Image (cartoon, coloured by chain):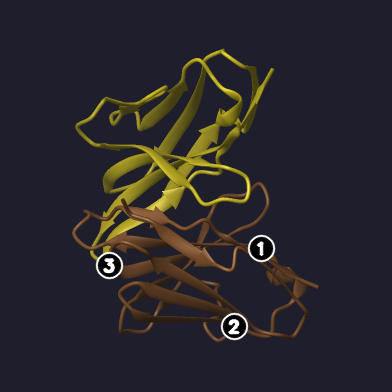
């Protein structure tokens, strides 16, 4: 069964600090891995997408890593801002006959405080 | 860009009534749209896959007669929650897969349904 697990479940950090969110997955056959940011009451917004051959990808203050051998990914946020407070969801895509099928993690709830 | 809109953003209805939620791809054509449900502090759960011009494919455990899906054009899919009950109260999110995007899904902003 395809699964995506994220840790920690929730996290509180001070503004300006860095943090790293983790994602472990058992999804096969692997197609790609995405990190999304979901603000409360809003739909998810894509931050990064990585395929099997990519180890790292950056989008501004967000840097995602992927280790396809250990099936782990991380999302590093630098110099956090209050607006970074949101749920961060790891989504792994499996390639099926009917197209990509997504498996969602339960998300890490990040709160950035003054 | 690839913008997906949903309407309404919030709806409150009485138990037993039906509610229709629209999902539109504003600047691209989407042969496939997806409907998700999200309960508080939980992840998105796929309800059904909607293909333009054909019947939707429902995930196991999702009642197709209760959640009617119509994908009448390449830019519009609708989800109708029939005979809504309080347990149907949830956050409903659609996504649209852009033609030729390699499977990329673009998510709408969601619709908060509250059944009283």
Instruction: Residue at 61%, 25% (x, y): give it.
Output: A82
The residue at which mark 1 appears reads as B90
Q: Is residue B18 above or below residue B74?
A: below
| Element marked by disc 3 | loop
The answer for how far apart the CA atoms under marks 2 and 1 are is 15 Å
User: Is label 1 in contact with label 3 (beta carbons under 8 Å)?
Assistant: no
The answer for how far apart the CA atoms under marks 2 and 3 are is 27 Å
Q: Which chain is brown?
A: B
Left or right of residue B106: residue A20 = right
Instruction: Residue at 50%, 38% (x, y): give it.
Output: A5
Q: Is residue A48 above or below residue B35?
A: above
Q: Give the x, y percent position of residue A21.
A: 50, 26
The residue at which mark 3 appears reads as B29
The residue at which mark 2 appears reads as B66
* Mark 1 belongs to chain: B
* Mark 3 belongs to chain: B
Q: Which chain is yellow?
A: A
């Amino acid at each position: 069964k395809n699964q995506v697990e994220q840790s920690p479940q929730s996290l509180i950090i001070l503004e300006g600090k860095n943090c790293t969110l983790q994602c472990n997955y058992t999804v096969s056959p692997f197609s790609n891995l995405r990190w999304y940011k979901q603000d409360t009451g809003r739909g998810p917004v894509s931050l990064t997408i990585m395929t099997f051959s990519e180890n790292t990808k950056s989008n501004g203050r967000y840097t995602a890593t992927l280790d396809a051998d250990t099936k782990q990914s991380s999302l590093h946020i630098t110099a956090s801002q209050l607006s970074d407070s949101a749920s961060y969801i790891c989504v792994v895509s499996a390639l099926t006959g009917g197209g990509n099928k997504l498996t969602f993690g339960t998300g890490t709830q990040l709160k950035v405080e003054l | 860009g690839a913008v997906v809109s949903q309407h309404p953003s919030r709806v409150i209805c009485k138990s037993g009534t039906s509610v229709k939620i629209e999902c539109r791809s504003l600047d691209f054509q989407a042969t496939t749209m997806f409907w998700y449900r999200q309960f508080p502090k939980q992840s998105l759960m796929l309800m059904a896959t909607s293909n333009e011009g054909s019947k939707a494919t429902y995930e196991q455990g999702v009642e197709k007669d209760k959640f009617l899906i119509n994908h009448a054009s390449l830019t519009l899919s609708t989800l109708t929650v029939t005979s809504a009950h309080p347990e149907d109260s949830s956050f409903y999110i659609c996504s649209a897969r852009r033609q030729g995007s390699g499977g990329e899904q673009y998510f709408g902003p969601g619709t908060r349904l509250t059944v009283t």
